[in-house]
Image (cartoon, coloured by chain):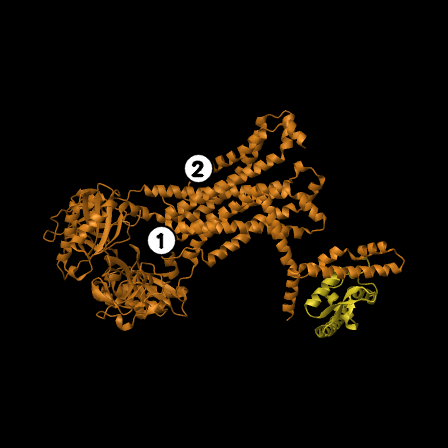
């Protein structure tokens, strides 16, 4: 009750201020009159009595002020006053306001934009129930690292693990979607029936899988992604129960996934893994590791470390029990959150650090501007102090002004960030952030709000306390306007500048290191020619192509027709092309080699390719010959190997003519020998920064594969050939989708996306930092010149030359720069280490880069000091002295 | 503020105002004079602090003000204790007595 009354009374004072004020005035006047009458009884005159009362009891205004300041509404009231005063002050100096606002807008805007990435990718909770208990499991092998899980191993894990309450296999599976306008390839996952319930998700429409549907031979059912349901089924709720044609088979749509469902791969459809295994019986082999991680939910009582040690034990037992397939295979557990972050974490955090530096520099600049203004306002402040305002009160008012500045700048900054996030989402190729949403959501806006308040304190506190310091005020009273700046204040300003320069150097060094890395990386020879090579993928999954002959014929037809197209210099087929992450690896046994342990056989990448593959992709032939049209199903089995394999297993340079088999020797079977006919150069299959691996090539007619890439080397712009190629392929089979159409140079470019993205933004931020620092040092030197005009005049009158003055002023800039560079170098040495994982061919302490960055900063900051120095040089001693 | 007079312990002014008003409704100046007289000049009450206390008590519903003509035919605001104020005064008086006695015991014990 009393709270309400308090509120009501406070509001009354706020909104009926005059009435309340009049009442209080009248009451206090009555009080004074009564006190005076008392005194008059003792014989004083009325005038004397009133004066005595004022002396004894304080003036009416002071009393009023005390009473007013007692209620909570007074805080609101003074805040309002300060706000209006602050806005008025900002309007009075538009130049200062514009520079400060722009600086803050850039600082806060850049931070907000980058934080939207930090939040979306690193912080935003996954849309799953209790996501911290979700773990992704893989197998590992010393030869490769993390690999997929084979289905029989998954089954053993499931039956033996106690630390996981549930596990599900999640197998990447592509589908050809037909029966719509154009045949297309969509991404999907074949999952155990409990997949969604492990994630704690329910279908948006329809129902989840039932255990009975997760079996080979069960009627095919499918769950659609929300996006696919929107784009292909017009968001029609009656789609549930309808049939959709995938790979030429009718699937019943049983449900639609919720819109916020995400997975690490493109998941347009989900199918029970049981039916998928029915169609892919090879995956039932223990040695077959396709593209299948396992999702697990930790049991309520178990911890991550427990689960890891239990799983390691299980993997060790399986590796003893099934050495042929599991020798040296271990297990890797990754929190699901981490797999959604991908390899961008360090890049994002580095950028976040960089923008924080930019904001700090911006704050230092604004603080310096405020100090200059504070020096101009010493009279005003002294006057207010003299009239009885407390120092605290004035600091509060100046901080309110800072807050006004920060809020206005921040609002502009958020507008910039809105544009910035749009730019970022366009700059970054789809898939890099694994479905994370990068936008200005409430969390990001809250961050911007916190930043605004913090910034107001960071740049406002020092100037506010500084300009209300008693010694400042003494200077003022002495009245010598020319030397109004105390040494303490110049030291403060110098500190800000040194900090700005140091931070700028850190950013410049980071940007320099990234530039050098990217340059070195792009000059790495990938082992193939990237110019004018078009690639596209096809996967024949429908019934007509379940025979090898049909597959061979289709591909041969494609090759023959595409080769006749005008503009096509050459065309070839290959199962796995570099830099696409697509791969196929298998153990081989070389004739006559001592048999190693099962887990230590040579494990090359394998390619099934057509004739002309090496020349189309520009992979050099080092020895022997490439495949010809006669290396077909009727010819003897042949292969090519890469230089690395030849070097490691045939050190005498005699690989050509030697034989090997796929897999391990099996006494029960006649060995299928392949004869090596040629040696090709190594290719960087897994990225420019990744070392080459062992590679084996076989003729596609001897190893027919439904999934192939078509490579076309063209005389002209390769993209211009796309539609002609489409037409040719459609004339062979119009129902087979063509997808992943791109060029080799695009693939190379995409493979360095994270680095390029980091470099562009880091370059942008260090440029901003440099500009701000230059403005900062320019401002400080200019101000110091303006302050010392009289000194300079005297010195020149006493015979100092213009060069002396110039040297003196530039000397100040040089000293500040020197200290800034020194501190910056120390900071940069420490800070650039976080970039290590993004660097290539250059150490995080690269001397050349650091020297270059220092030079850039030195030149810019000396130039910024030179301009005001020139002004100092032109000071006319007569004018300077008379002015005073 | 006079040299000899002491500042009031934080919060005690509210209690003294309540006590003064327990006898009869009174205006601001009257409250001052009464407190200073009763304390025999130990306490000195400034109008600023007094009206601040009054504003606080009024907002808490412990006292109620009303404009009236004073003895000298001047308009003045007279404050009277509410029922709630009377209860608060009783409580605080009792609590004060307890604390004062306790403090006295401690000081004498040494």
What residue is disc 2 on?
A852
Residue A863 position within the rendered picture, expressed as x and y whole percent measured from the top left = 51, 34
Q: Is residue A629 left or right of residue A5?
A: left
Residue A452 position within the rendered picture, expressed as x and y whole percent measured from the top left = 53, 52
What residue is disc 1 on?
A432
Mark closer to the chain start, 1 or 2: 1
Residue B81 position within the rendered picture, expressed as x and y whole percent measured from the top left = 74, 72
Q: CA distance from mark 1 to mark 2?
A: 32 Å
Q: Is residue A665 left or right of residue A378?
A: left
What color does chain B have in the rendering?
A: yellow
Q: Nearer the viewer, residue A460 or A339?
A: A460
Q: Secondary structure at mark 1?
A: loop
Residue A45 position within the rendered picture, expressed as x and y whole percent measured from the top left = 87, 55
Q: Badge 1, how many Cα within 10 Å: few under 14, some, many 20+? A: some
What color does chain A have in the rendering?
A: orange
Q: Quadrant of the C terminus of chain A?
A: top right
């Amino acid at each position: 009750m009393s709270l309400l009354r308090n509120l009501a009374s406070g509001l009354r004072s706020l909104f009926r201020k005059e009435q309340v004020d009049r009442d209080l005035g009248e009451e206090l006047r009555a009080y004074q009159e009564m006190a005076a009458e008392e005194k008059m009884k003792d014989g004083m005159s009325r005038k004397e009595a009133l004066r005595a009362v004022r002396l004894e009891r304080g003036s009416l205004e002071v009393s009023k002020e005390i009473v007013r300041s007692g209620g909570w509404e007074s805080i609101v009231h003074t805040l309002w006053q300060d706000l209006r005063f602050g806005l008025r002050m900002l309007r009075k100096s538009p130049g200062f306001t514009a520079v400060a606002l722009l600086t803050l807008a850039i600082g806060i805007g850049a931070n907000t934009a980058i934080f939207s990435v930090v939040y979306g990718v690193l912080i935003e909770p996954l849309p799953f129930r209790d996501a911290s208990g979700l773990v992704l499991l893989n197998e590992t092998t010393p030869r490769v690292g993390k690999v997929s899980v084979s289905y029989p191993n998954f089954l053993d894990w499931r039956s033996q693990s106690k630390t996981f309450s549930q596990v599900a296999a999640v197998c990447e599976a592509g589908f050809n979607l037909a029966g719509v306008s154009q045949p297309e390839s969509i991404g999907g996952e074949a999952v155990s029936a409990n997949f969604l319930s492990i994630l704690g998700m329910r279908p948006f429409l329809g129902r989840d899988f039932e255990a009975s549907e997760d079996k080979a031979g069960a009627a095919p059912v499918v769950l659609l992604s929300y996006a696919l349901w929107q784009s292909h089924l017009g968001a029609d709720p009656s789609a549930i129960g309808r049939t959709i044609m995938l790979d030429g088979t009718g699937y019943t749509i049983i449900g639609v996934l919720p819109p916020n469902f995400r997975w690490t791969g493109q998941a347009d459809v989900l199918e029970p893994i049981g039916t998928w295994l029915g169609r892919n019986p090879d995956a039932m082999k223990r040695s077959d590791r396709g593209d299948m991680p396992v999702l697990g939910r930790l049991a309520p009582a178990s911890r991550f470390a427990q689960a890891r040690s239990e799983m390691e034990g299980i993997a060790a037992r399986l590796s003893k029990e099934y050495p042929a397939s599991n020798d040296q295979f271990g297990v890797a557990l990754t929190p699901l959150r981490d797999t959604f972050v991908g390899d961008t974490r360090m890049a994002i955090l580095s950028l976040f650090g960089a923008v924080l530096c930019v904001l700090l520099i911006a704050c230092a600049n604004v603080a310096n501007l405020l100090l200059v203004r504070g020096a101009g306002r010493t009279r005003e402040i002294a006057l207010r102090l003299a009239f009885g305002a407390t120092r605290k009160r004035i600091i509060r008012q100046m901080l309110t002004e800072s807050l006004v500045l920060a809020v206005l700048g921040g609002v502009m900054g958020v507008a910039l960030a809105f544009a910035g996030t749009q730019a970022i989402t366009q700059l970054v190729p789809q898939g890099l952030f694994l479905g994370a949403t990068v936008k200005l959501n409430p969390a990001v806006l809250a961050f911007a709000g916190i930043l605004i308040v913090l910034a107001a304190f960071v740049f406002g506190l020092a100037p506010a306390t500084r300009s209300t310091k008693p010694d400042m005020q003494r200077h003022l009273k002495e009245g010598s306007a020319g030397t109004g700046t105390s040494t303490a204040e110049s030291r403060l300003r110098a500190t800000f500048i040194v900090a700005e320069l140091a931070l700028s150097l850190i950013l410049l060094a980071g940007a320099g290191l990234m530039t050098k890395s990217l340059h070195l990386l792009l000059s790495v020879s990938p082992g193939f020619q990237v110019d004018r090579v078009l690639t596209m993928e096809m996967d024949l999954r429908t019934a007509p192509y379940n025979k090898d002959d049909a597959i061979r014929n289709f591909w041969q037809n494609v090759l023959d027709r595409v080769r006749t197209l005008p503009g096509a210099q050459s065309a070839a087929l290959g199962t796995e092309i570099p830099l696409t992450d697509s791969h196929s690896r298998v153990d081989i046994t070389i004739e006559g080699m001592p048999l190693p342990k099962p887990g230590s056989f040579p494990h090359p990448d394998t390619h099934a390719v057509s004739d002309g593959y090496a020349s189309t992709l520009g992979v050099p032939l080092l020895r022997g010959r490439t495949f010809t049209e006669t290396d077909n199903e009727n010819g003897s089995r042949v292969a090519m190997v890469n230089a690395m394999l030849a070097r490691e297993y045939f050190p005498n340079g005699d690989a050509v003519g030697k034989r090997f088999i796929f897999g391990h020797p099996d006494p029960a079977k006649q060995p299928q020998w392949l004869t090596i006919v040629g040696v090709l150069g190594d290719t960087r299959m897994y990225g420019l920064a990744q070392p080459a691996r062992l590679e084996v090539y076989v003729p596609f007619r001897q190893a027919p594969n439904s999934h192939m890439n078509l490579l076309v080397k063209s005389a002209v712009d390769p993209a211009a050939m796309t539609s002609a190629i489409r037409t040719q392929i459609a004339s062979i089979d119009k129902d087979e989708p063509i997808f992943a159409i791109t060029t080799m140079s695009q693939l190379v470019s995409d493979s360095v996306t994270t680095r390029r993205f980091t470099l562009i933004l880091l370059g942008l931020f260090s440029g901003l930092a440099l500009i701000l620092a230059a403005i900062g040092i320019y401002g400080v030197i200019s101000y110091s010149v303006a302050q010392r005009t009289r000194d300079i005049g005297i010195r020149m009158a006493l015979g100092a030359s213009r060069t002396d003055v110039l040297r003196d002023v530039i000397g100040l800039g040089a000293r500040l720069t020197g200290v800034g560079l020194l501190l910056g170098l120390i900071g940069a040495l420490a800070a650039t280490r976080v970039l290590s994982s993004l660097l290539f061919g250059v150490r995080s302490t690269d001397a050349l880069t650091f020297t270059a960055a220092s030079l850039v900063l030195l030149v810019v900051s000396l130039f910024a000091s030179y301009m005001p120095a020139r002004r100092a040089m032109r000071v006319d001693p007569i004018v300077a002295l008379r002015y005073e | 503020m006079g040299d000899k007079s002491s500042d009031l312990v934080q919060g005690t002014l509210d209690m003294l105002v309540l006590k003064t008003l327990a006898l009869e409704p009174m205006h601001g100046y009257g409250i001052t004079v009464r407190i200073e007289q009763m304390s025999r000049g130990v306490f000195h009450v400034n109008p600023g602090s007094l009206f601040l206390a009054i504003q606080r008590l009024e907002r808490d519903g412990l006292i109620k003000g009303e404009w009236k003509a004073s003895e000298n035919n001047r308009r003045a605001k007279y404050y009277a204790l509410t029922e709630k104020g009377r209860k608060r005064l009783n409580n605080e008086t009792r609590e004060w007595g307890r604390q004062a006695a306790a403090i006295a015991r401690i000081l004498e014990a040494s």
